[in-house]
Every structure is written in structure tokens, then in C-alpha cells.
Image (spheres, coloured by chain):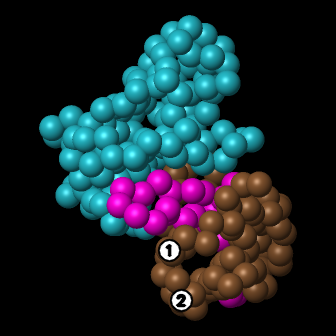
Chain colours: A cyan, B brown
Amino acid sequence: DSGVTQTPKHLITATGQRVTLRCSPRSGDLSVYWYQQSLDQGLQFLIQYYNGEERAKGNILERFSAQQFPDLHSELNLSSLELGDSALYFCASSVGPGREVEQYFGPGTRLTVT
Amino acid sequence: QKEVEQDPGPLSVPEGAIVSLNCTYSNSAFQYFMWYRQYSRKGPELLMYTYSSGNKEDGRFTAQVDKSSKYISLFIRDSQPSDSATYLCAMPNSGGYQKVTFGTGTKLQVIP
């Protein structure tokens, strides 16, 4: 158990809908990362937050947004969902900047868009 | 060309074999090199990371970096069925808040 929690474990929704994925980092970690993992694209970095502020952005679609709250948990919002958004979404956490090499991953949320 | 390339496998070996998993990369600015293990339907788990060139050993696992060839390897000695998983290499971009680029992973199966 990495200490990173993610809810829900599974999510099934329809195209056009909006969902929110939640992540709680390990105790003491200030950085949160979101990744998308699909069969054809592998693990893709979406976005990083550090202590409530956005710090790095990857291949995140405009339909997706995230935030990190004062208690350090983070939420990833996916809207206007398309079939191609079906994937595993992982959250990871680390102590902070410069410690990206030691990221600890949660169990993931499996999103299925029908 | 992807920044990080991995042979997807699957790679099947008998129990007790030495396994070699490899990645190539194109960005010469990469300085840290990480290896993750991912069991089916689970999150990736950090195995080890190395800085710059050279070797690093942790139990049955050895990570090797050859920056001149932009080639990294993970060796597993005395492989066990419990090592059956997908192995991902990963490299953070240099600089401040860093994006991490992952390889697509190599699926390993260790046959008892």
C-alpha cells in the first residue's frame, strides 16, 4: 500500500457527462500528479500541483481540469466525456519539487465511457 | 519518435533466469532514470532510480545507465513468478517542476 488513496475505483458513465476523480496524497507529501493510462498511449502525464498551485502541465485536454485543496487532496474533473477518455487515471504524490523521482502511485480509477 | 521507447514484450522466461529489460531515450537532458513495476490492474510501484551513468543494485535488481548510448537497463537476477508484471522506465525532464515521461512498459512473465 503506497499510502495514496483514490476514489472511486470504477466509474461508468455516458458520453457528454462530467465526472470528478478524487485523490488523497501520502501523509506529508505536498505534490500531486495526475496520469492517464490507456492501452495504446501508455502512462501519460496530465498535470502536477504543489501545495495548492499548478506547477507543470502535460498532455491535458481543455475539457479536463484539476485542483489541489488546502488539505492537499486533489480532484481531476473530466467533462464532455468521449469514448476515447476511457482509461485508468492514476494519482501520484511526492514530497515536493525536486523529488519527482520518488512518486508514489495510488490504485487508480478505471473510467469507462459508454 | 517517442522520447522514451520500450519493447512491449511480452517477455517469457523460466523461473531463476536473469532478465534484462531495456529502454532507449532521445532527450540527452535526462539525468534521473526510474524503474517502476506495475501488476495487472494496480498502480505503478517505484522499484529504484539512478542518477546519471553507472550501476545501482538493490537486492535482485540492478539498474544500469549508459548516457553515451541513451540506453538504460534493469536486470533481475533469480527471477521469480512474483516478478511477473509490467516494467516501466521513466525519466523526469530537467529543471524545476518536472514532467515525467514514461515508457510504455515491458510485460514480463516468469514461468514456474
Magenta region: B76-104
Residue receiving disc 2? B56
- Residue B30 location in percent, x, y? 55, 70
Instruction: Report the front residue among A107 and B35.
Output: B35
Q: Is residue A2 visible?
A: no
Residue receiving disc 1? B32
Compared to A89, does B20 lie above or below?
A: below
Residue B31 in the figure: left or right of residue A97: right
Residue count near mark 2 (Cα–Cα under 10 Å), binned few <14, some 14–19, many ≥20? some
Marks 2,1: beta carbons within 8 A: no
Residue A18 in the figure: left or right of residue B91: left
Image point (54%, 90%), residue name: B57
Q: Which mark is residue B11?
A: none
Instruction: Report the front residue among B111 and A56.
Output: A56
Image point (22%, 41%), residue name: A52
**Magenta span includes B94:** yes
Q: Secondary structure at mark 2?
A: strand
Amino acid type at circle 1 is Tyr
Image point (75%, 63%), residue name: B6
- Residue A81 location in percent, x, y? 56, 16
Please identify the residue farthest to the left as the structure is shown: A70
Compared to B27, does A92 lie above or below?
A: above
Image point (16%, 40%), residue name: A71
Q: Quadrant of the N terminus of chain B?
A: bottom right
Q: Chain of mark 2?
A: B
Compared to A107, does A19 lie above or below?
A: above
**Magenta span includes B43:** no
Q: Secondary structure at mark 1?
A: strand
- Residue B104 location in percent, x, y? 69, 55
Instruction: Report the front residue among A56 and B6.
Output: A56
Amino acid type at circle 2 is Lys
